[in-house]
Image (spheres, rainbow, N blue to C red):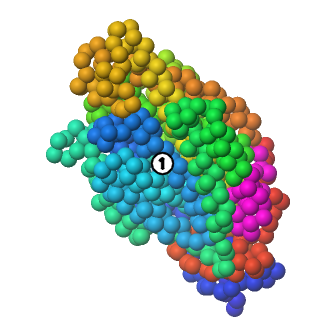
Amino acid sequence: MATPTPPGVRGAGGGSVAKDTHIPADADSAPMTHRQIMKALSGLLLGMFVAILSSTIVSTALPQIIADLDGSQSSYTWVVTATLLTMTASTPLWGKLADLTSKKMLVQISLVIFVLASAGAGLSQNTATLIGFRAVQGLGMGGLTALAQIILAAMISPRERGRYSGYLGATFALATVGGPLLGGVITDTEALGWRWCFYVGVPFAVIALIVLQKTLKLPVVRRQGVKIDWLGAGVFSAAVSALLIWVTLAGDKYAWLSWQTAVLVGGAVTLALLFVYIESRAPEPIVPLRLFRNRTITLASLASLFIGVAMFGATVFLSQYFQLARGQTPTMSGLMTIPMIAGLVLSSTVSGQVITRTGRWKVWLTSGAVLLTAGLGLLGTLRYDTPYVQVAVFMALLGLGIGMMMQNLVLCTQNQVEPEDLGTTSSVVAFFRSLGGAVGVSALGAILAQRVGGYTQDGFAALGMAPGSTQTDGGIPDLSTLPGPVRTVIESAYGHGIGDIYLYASPVALIALLLVVFIKEVPLKTKSGIQQGSTDDTPAGGGAGAFEEAVPVAAGAGAAAGPPPRSGAMAPDRTG
């Protein structure tokens, strides 16, 4: 009796199989029960929680950290941008690796990288060291961000995925709100200090690794002889880095229209074109260009780019607003962001449940884009003395919009591709969101520095004072040490300046809305990635996440890498 062919491996007529591995008889392709899925997801959700907590816990502490390390507004921006830069550059690589090897091993590696870098960041004695460790953190964060969606897609069908995407969204929101609160308490506690913001996640990460090892089990198809496109990855990283360095430094270190701008922008464009050429010829490209023949993937990726600009650019500076424009403590600034997080939790959870029941997802994307645009526009009216009730309503609208869009943009693209492209496609969407976030934080941070400087000078001029006499220019001010009139000028400058950057972000969200409108609503599939691979290959395929079985496959064996090519190698757009 012939041994059954594992999922994703072709037998006769589909390429030679390097090794035939028996799959347990009980590992059928039946859908996993809710209990099985939650057990498998427990370690993944815990890992995501630790990573996001370790990232957001720093947000309320950053003004104090930068002040203690004698940093500037530019340093503040780069502490955030460094993480986004490496996360952006590494996300497609993590996605490609997920299509080629063990997803479980990759998520554990990314978690270890992230936590070790967090511990290193806590030892920083200057902003340069802190920025360096934050860059390494981004490598781990890129893996966790991409792999969470990829693993979810492997185990759960698109129709059911909305429900579990809501759990991811709720985990994200819980860590997002818990991080700033915990970070504020730690920073305000003299016995601890801000360095413990980086250390506190380590024990939780160890627990997450143990739980992941015990609960997350997926079938693995390893392809022998496959070479990662390291040249493409390097050129890609260089192009993104050149772009972000230009956006961050322009208007501060040199003029927007200058020879430095010409060199950096020209270099970024040249490297981007070179990357496209490399990817078009690479046997295993990091970002397969054929994916963009699908209109949904192209529009969703571009929408994610603009959503990233608005989402990261808008939320990163909220802590500065509450601490530097309203004079709140780190703990209080964390508490004051609760309306935004509550909106995110509510919308991500409710939209996920309703999508699972109805199968309709576009109305949530469109509504989310409308709310995001409205929230940013209203936040553009912020001043240092804006009533908090108004600020809370504006933040809630922002959170509702983000919650409706963040997971569902990934869902609509995963629904369009074959199982062998799930990892790459998921990481492409995450990449564009991260790229938008990195560009948004850099650009809006540069604009904020300019605006605050201008408003500060105007305020001092009105008081008949010279700015240099206040010892606040060029750095993050400590409001508690400033005399009353000077403090009011600084608070007003930050309140007005941060309001301005929301105004700049709102048209970007409007562009995302226009892109979402043109995405066709395609009925959600009812089979998971594992089930699709099993159905495509053989009825005796692998189980729905109940085991982890390595099956080496010859890379050059025709269609041995997965199901035979279909038209466009992906599901076409269908109107539903």
Assign a secondary structure to mark 1.
helix
Place residue 92 in its image quadrant.
Answer: bottom right
Looking at the picture, tell me which residue is in the foreground, 348 or 374: 374
Q: Is residue 294 magenta?
A: yes
* Magenta-tinted stretch: 273-297
Dominant secondary-structure state across the stretch colored magenta = helix
The image quadrant of residue 4 is bottom right
Rendered residue at 57%/61% (across/down): 94
Q: Which residue is mark 1?
A: 82
Which quadrant holds the C terminus? top right
Q: Where residue 428 sits: x, y (%)?
A: 64, 52
**Looking at the image, which is closer to me, 128 or 212?**
128
Q: Give the residue drawn at x 43%, y 62%.
A: 113
Left or right of residue 515: residue 43: left
**Residue 383, percent across and down?**
42, 17
Residue 455, above or below 370: above
Q: Can you say whether 465 is above or below 148 in the image?
A: above
Residue 453 among those drawn in magenta: no
Residue 343 in view (yes/no): no
Residue 484 visible to the viewer:
yes
Left or right position of 93 against 16? left
